[in-house]
Amino acid sequence: MNTRFLIYSATAAAFLGLAGCASAPGESIYVPAGSSRAEAPEPPEASSKDDKPRVWRKSEQPEVSEPAEPAPRSSSPSYRDAGDSLSPAAISLIREADNLLAQGDAPAAIARLERAQRIAPRSAEVYFKLSEAYVASDQLGTAEQFTLKGLSLAGSNARLQRSGWLLLADIRRARGNVAGADQAEARAANL
């Protein structure tokens, strides 16, 4: 009895599903909400060239060369020169994470630092701190990735670059990548 009912139900559901997808040949299945098929607007028709003036697309318009004025330089550095500055909330979270790391609670420190990362996503310092926390929790692969991200955001800040390369050297040495550690130390020495 239950098998027959299940087969009947499945067959009825399949037919209803297919019936819902069907439309008469040449008819649109689109009907705006709150209206019937008879009230649906007609699609726009192509007009002849004589009806309306031609509208030029931006790509079709002739180029006019005007003397370019140099863009004014802002006094703040671009993101390539330096990462985001830390907000007071991010600084507070980093301090909490440092205290938690000192107490040996790496997972809680990582949680605080991930919140700091959401507040300041372009701050190299946050990524370096996250890397240190992952080293403390013995997740060296993740720590290396966060260090590389921090290095990409450090920009031209030599202090951040140097600390990032030294951190990367320590992580690579701990992972057994002596050649990579030597390269990272050489990059830090060149700064």
Image: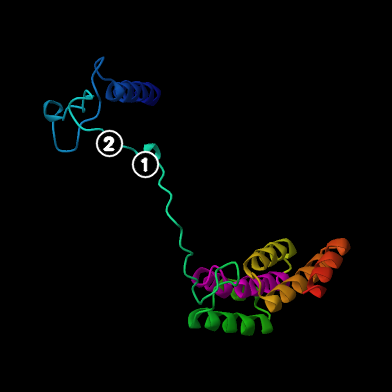
Magenta run includes residue 129: yes
Near-viewer residue (33 or 180): 180
Distance, label 1 to label 2, CA atoms, is: 10 Å
Q: Which region of the structure is painted magenta?
A: 112-137
Mark 1, Cα crowd under 10 Å, few <14 / some 14-19 / many 20+, is few
Q: Is residue 114 left or right of residue 36?
A: right
Quarter location, residue 61: top left
Does 41 sit above or below residue 61? above
Q: Secondary structure at mark 1?
A: helix
The N terminus: image quadrant: top left
Q: Residue at x 38, y 22 (%)?
A: 7
What residue did someone put label 1 on? 58
Q: Position of residue 103 (x, y in %)?
A: 67, 84
Q: Is residue 162 magenta?
A: no
User: What scheme was used to colour the molecule?
Assistant: rainbow
Nearer-the-camera pick, 136 or 70: 70
Q: For the C terminus, give its image quadrant.
A: bottom right
Crowding near pointer 2: few (<14 within 10 Å), some, many (20+)?
Answer: few
For the residue marked with disc 1, what is the amino acid? Lys
Q: Report the residue at 34% width, 38% height from top.
A: 57
Q: Secondary structure at mark 2?
A: loop
Image position of 167 (left or right of 111): right
Which amino acid is tagged 2? Answer: Val
Q: Quadrant of residue 67?
A: bottom left
Q: Position of residue 48 (x, y in %)?
A: 22, 23
- The image's mark for residue 55 is 2
In the displayed structure image, the side of residue 91 where residue 52 appears, left or right: left
Could you tell me which residue is drawn at 74 percent across and 75 percent down? 162
Identify which residue is drawn at 65% across, 78% down.
105
Where is residue 18 drawn, in percent x and y?
32, 22
Total marks in image: 2
